[in-house]
Amino acid sequence: MAHLLGDFILQPNSWVAEKESKKLKSKYLYLHVLIHTALSFIFLWDFELWWVAALVGISHFIIDAAKLSFQTIKNKKNWFFIDQALHIAVIGGVSLYFNEFNIEFLKDQSFLKILMAALFLTTPASIFIKILLSSWTPVPETATNIQTESLSSAGKYIGILERLLVFTFIMVDHWEGVGFMVAAKSVFRFSDLAQAKQRKLTEYVLIGTLLSFGMAVLTGILIK
């Protein structure tokens, strides 16, 4: 709670912008760390654990300082996730020290099966689908066709997200969610395919979509 409040809710965008421009010279960096330390102490509410709040504050400063020093426009997204992972690792380490958190769940076979299935439905499933569709390729766009711009690797990530959502719906016994996903994707895709006016492209997208949903459904059934 202290981390979520300090890193997101109580940190205005103006502070973030100044920290990125002035880096270690920004006063908001030190104010931000002070707020984190104070919040940690407040939520612990035990003076004997002052060193835990201090540890969180010091580690937060070191991690944020490293992020500001090495972050560039190109790797900004990567550094955001690295920064958050390191902060959570510190909190997790403290929890392990006080036996407030354990990793016994990693020995649970049911959990490992679900984790394995979820991992399969990300990049591995994308590769399977790509190979299965390799014998068919969409008709190249010509001057007579409507040119459409697409985000880099958007199709790959859309497929991963839809498979994970379908898998989640099945695992929590809400099959109606799968129908919702199919309907939602059909609505979004309809206008693109209608404009393209290419039957082969429509068939290509339809096969890929059905393969993606089919893999997610089959995986969910096997794990259940």
Image (spheres, rainbow, N blue to C red):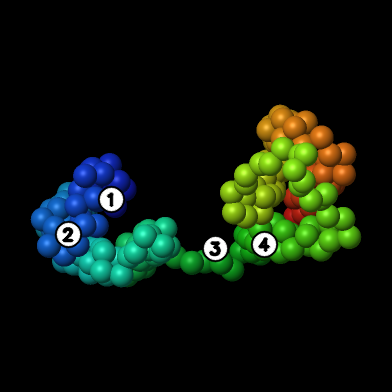
Residue 163 in sight: yes
x 52%, y 66%: residue:
104
Q: What element carries label 1?
A: helix
**Residue hosting label 2:** 22
* Distance (Cα) linking label 4 and label 1: 31 Å
Q: Quadrant of residue 65?
A: bottom left
Query: Do the residues under discs 4 and 3 have CB atoms within 8 angstroms?
Result: no
In the displayed structure, 224 sits above or below 95; it is above
For residue 27, side relative to residue 53 (left or right): left
Q: Earlier in the sequence, mark 4 or mark 3?
A: 3
* Distance (Cα) linking label 2 and label 3: 43 Å
* Distance (Cα) linking label 4 and label 2: 39 Å
x 34%, y 64%: residue:
72
**Residue hosting label 1:** 7
- Front residue of 155/140: it is 140
**Relative image position of residue 124 (x, y in whole percent):** 71, 64
x 75%, y 43%: residue:
143
Residue type, mark 2 in image = Lys
**Residue hosting label 4:** 123
- Front tag of 4 and 2: 2
Q: In which quarter of the image is residue 21?
A: bottom left
* Distance (Cα) linking label 3 and label 1: 28 Å
Q: Earlier in the sequence, mark 4 or mark 1?
A: 1
Residue 218 in sight: no
**Relative image position of residue 207 (x, y in whole percent):** 85, 47
Q: Crowdedness of circle 2 by 10 Å Cα count: few (<14), some, many (20+)?
A: few
- Front tag of 4 and 3: 4
In the displayed structure, 3 sits above or below 85; it is above
**Residue hosting label 3:** 105
Q: What element carries label 3?
A: helix
